[in-house]
Image (spheres, grey):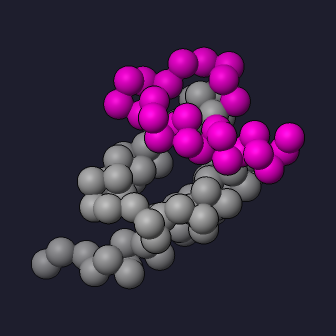
Amino acid sequence: MSELHEHRLKRLKMRSMRRGIKEMDLILSAYADDTLHRMDDAALTLYDDMLNENDQDLYQWVTGQAEAPERFKALIARISLQFQGETG
């Protein structure tokens, strides 16, 4: 049985809020609140896959300290732009 869309959004929002480091909690929960409801299934799957990555790596990608893997580059760029908008 496949996951209902509304349940998937709730699960992804929860995973965005409950990260390993507080900085990623803040960055990803804000992004999830603003963006997940507008994503199609493919984008949600990519976001879900990204959430499986290590928080230290995610933080470095979002802040530009390291280059994100090719498959996540566009998503990380959007998250980074939102993060910079909130802090800049």
Measuring from the top left, give residue 15's x and y in whole percent: 52, 61
Quadrant position of the C terminus in the picture: top right
Which residue sits at x=67%, y=47%?
Answer: 82
Locate residue 29: give its quadrant.
bottom right
Q: Residue furthest left?
A: 1
Measuring from the top left, give residue 50's x and y in whole percent: 43, 43
Measuring from the top left, give residue 10's x and y in whole percent: 47, 75
Does the magenta stretch mainly form a helix, a strand or a loop?
helix
Left or right of 43: which side holds 20? Answer: right
Which residue sits at x=28%, y=80%?
Answer: 4
Residue 62 is at least partly visible in this image: yes
In this orientation, which residue lies closer to the viewer: 76 or 51? 76
Query: 18 above or below 5?
Result: above
Residue 52 is at least partly visible in this image: no
**Magenta span contains residue 4:** no
Mark count: 0
Left or right of 68: which side holds 65? Answer: right
Locate residue 70: give its quadrant.
top left
Query: 12 above or below 19?
Result: below
**Magenta span contains residue 84:** yes
Which residue sits at x=13%, y=78%?
Answer: 1
In this orientation, which residue lies closer to the viewer: 57 or 20? 57
Query: 54 above or below 34?
Result: above
Which residue sits at x=71%, y=45%?
Answer: 83
Q: Residue furthest right?
A: 88
Left or right of 28: which side holds 68? Answer: left
Q: Which residues are magenta?
A: 63-88
